[in-house]
Image (cartoon, rainbow, N blue to C red):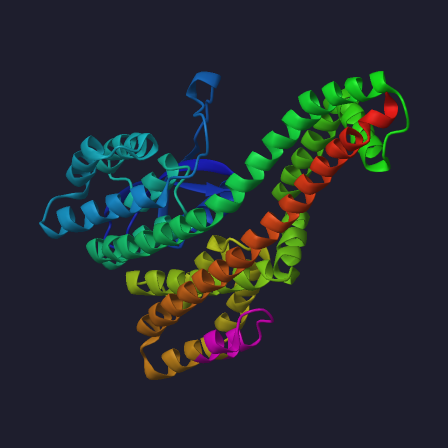
Amino acid sequence: MRTYRYSALTNEGLQKKGVVKALDEFEAVDKIKATYPVVTKINPVKETNSILDMEVGSSKVAHKHLAVMCSQFAIILKSGVGIARAMAMIAEQTEDKKLKKMLVASVEDISEGMGIADTMERHGQGLPMTFIETVRAGERSGTLANSFKAMETYFTRSQKTNQKVKQALTYPIFVVIVAIIVLIIVMAKVIPTLSAVFKDFGGELPAMTRVLIKTSEFFAAHWLFIMVIIGAIIAGLKLSALTEKGQVFWSNVVLKTPIIGKINLLTGSSQFATTMAVLLTAGLSIDDAIQTTAKSMTNRTLGDEVGRMTLSLQEGKSLGECIRRCNYFPNTLKEMCAIGEETGELEDTLLTIGDYYDNEASYAMQQAISKLEPTLLVFLALFAGFIVIAIYLPIFTMYNFM
């Protein structure tokens, strides 16, 4: 997609400037006219990227930094400070380099009359879709401070969820890493030394010992080839995940995998409910909120299910009717959405159900980790036992070789 800079007139005749991303100029004009009726000027923006401009690491912005920034915006805007001045103030305080760069670049564009969401989308490449669309909704409805406040809650909860996941996985990952290091040392140093000693004594070595020695010799002779194969497999998996078919395939695999699929579904349900609540609170219509939520879903299969609801909503069907047709979402989520819509308290209902599924996902993850830890220990104990027995069997019979 290309980026276009435009000038347009509002219904009141006020001039507005901004940027829009589209496949071509015709699509760009259509997108602009959805907000401003008259387009006076449109030009493609030339993107010039050099190696020196590239940033090391992930382009995504950490949710904890987004939460802090949203909190600052909510407080400063409620005090009556203009958006350009608020951006300049926050840019001076933020520690995240990506956000600082985005805010500094956005100040100048906003001073020239460009829309807030447009300039943030242009300069904030790592910003989530939810953030951009919520800002755009708050900008249109005049409730920008409330939109930032809602996003503060959203990204704070998201950050806490990510921390829970990292804490839960820390011990298993640590155990696996230590096991791999010990295995490499044993195979590369200990086994070859013992193998030479055993050969000096002659005689027939036990079968377990011969298997261990042959395995060590194989890895010693082909370690580079093995590393290349492993690297190729990892690269292939990553590349396949970048394609549309690959994303759909792996999303289906994840959802159908025991334990992991349940956790992923609970997490997706929480993400759907919470994202919808934030977008609706910011002033988006249900149609627009569904479209944005579909693009924000981590699991592609769940995102496609949400996206298919858009057409039915445009045909006049209710959210409850549309979500009941989804194959993966839990029945509790479907019924709560329908009840919230019928009672006129959809936002509050979605927040409540989002909290519920967030807690359920955390509990399911803790249960899975509690079962994984002893399983890892048993596996490592069996593996270590095999190595110890394979080493000590020849020692017990060494006198027979003399």
- Residue 299 spot, x, y in % from top left: 55, 55
- Residue at the far right: name it: 204
Q: Is residue 3 magenta?
A: no
Q: Is residue 325 magenta?
A: yes
**In the depicted structure, whether residue 184 falls above or below residue 172:** above
Magenta span: 321-335
Left/right placement of residue 394 relative to residue 256 reads: right
Q: Nearer the viewer, residue 346 or 188?
A: 188
- Residue 161 spot, x, y in % from top left: 39, 54
Which quadrant of the figure contains the C terminus?
top right
- Residue 142 spot, x, y in % from top left: 21, 57
Q: Nearer the viewer, residue 234 or 313?
A: 234
Q: In which quadrant of the rendered view does residue 138 lie?
A: bottom left
- From where the camera sits, is residue 316 visible? no
Q: Nearer the viewer, residue 42 or 95?
A: 95
Q: In which quadrant of the rendered view does residue 303 lie?
A: bottom right
- Residue 313 spot, x, y in % from top left: 49, 72
Going 46% across and 34% down the picture, which residue do you hit?
58
Going 15% across and 37% down the picture, which residue do you hit?
85
Left/right placement of residue 148 relative to residue 395 reads: left
Left/right placement of residue 97 relative to residue 272 reads: left
Left/right placement of residue 263 relative to residue 247 reads: left
**In the depicted structure, whether residue 362 falls above or below residue 184:** below
Going 63% across and 62% down the picture, which residue do you hit?
258
Q: Main secondary structure of the magenta part?
A: helix
**In the depicted structure, whether residue 335 falls above or below residue 381:** below
Q: In which quadrant of the rendered view does residue 184 lie?
A: top right
- From where the camera sits, is residue 157 visible? yes
Going 44% across and 17% down the picture, which residue do you hit?
52
